[in-house]
Image: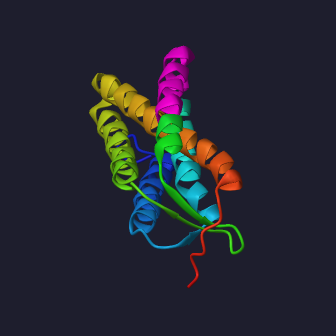
Amino acid sequence: MILHLNLLHVILVLSAIAAVYFAVREARGRLMRQTRLYNLPLVAMVVALILLLFQLAAHQPVWTFAATFGLGLAGGAARGLTMKLEVDQNWRLVRPTGRRVLFWVSLALPIAIGLEIAGTLAGPSGSPLRLAGAHVAMLCTGLLVGRALVLTVRLMRAPHVDLRR
């Protein structure tokens, strides 16, 4: 441990870099495989679970994180329902639209990790920062997971559009 940071903080920073990378790849508006839609929610879940474990070790109540995640899940599901999709069912390609919200949500994950690291460096007085970072990460993860769950259902039922011309 260096300055009260541990290996999990390194994993958090690497996950933040991966989240922004996956969001930028999706925000370009190019064709992508359907499975690439799930990379960003998976990375966000890793971040949220690590931050949740930190808060559970600090004896924070679990229901506050569940409520924040549920709120994000509802918002993400609403976003997934309203997105316009173009799906090539033969090649399993997709071109999602309206990607700016996704990019800003993915940028909130590094901010949450920054709050966690700043709270850790501040010591016991930084616990409100760590708590806020965990809640931001849970909200963002809920948004991304809710969107991914609704898109899973929509991708199966979407009409075919020939995207490989």
- Marks counted in the figure total 0
What is the span of residues highlighted in magenta in the rendered image? Answer: 55-75
Instruction: Give the camera-side residue of 58 and 95.
Output: 95
Magenta includes 69?
yes
Q: Residue shown at 48%/33% (left/top)?
A: 138
Residue 151 located left or right of residue 12: right
Position of residue 142 measured from the top left corner of the image (x, y, whole percent): 51, 35
Q: Which color mode does the image show? A: rainbow
Q: Is residue 40 visible?
A: yes
Q: Main secondary structure of the magenta part?
A: helix
Q: Is residue 144 visible?
A: no
Residue 111 located left or right of residue 84: left
Image vertical order of residue 63 relative to residue 21, above or below: above
Position of residue 26 measured from the top left corner of the image (x, y, whole percent): 45, 64
Instruction: Give the camera-side residue of 105 and 29.
Output: 29
Position of residue 121 measured from the top left corner of the image (x, y, whole percent): 30, 38
Residue 148 located left or right of residue 24: right
Position of residue 53 measured from the top left corner of the image (x, y, whole percent): 56, 32
Instruction: Give the camera-side residue of 44 and 59.
Output: 44
The quadrant holding residue 145 is top right
Q: Residue shown at 42%/54% (left/top)?
A: 16
Q: Residue shown at 46%/41% (left/top)?
A: 79
Image vertical order of residue 163 relative to residue 44, above or below: below
Residue 35 located left or right of residue 48: right
Q: Residue shown at 29%/39% (left/top)?
A: 118
> Farthest residue toward the bottom?
165
Quarter of the image with the C terminus is bottom right
Magenta includes 121?
no
Image vertical order of residue 91 relative to residue 124, above or below: below
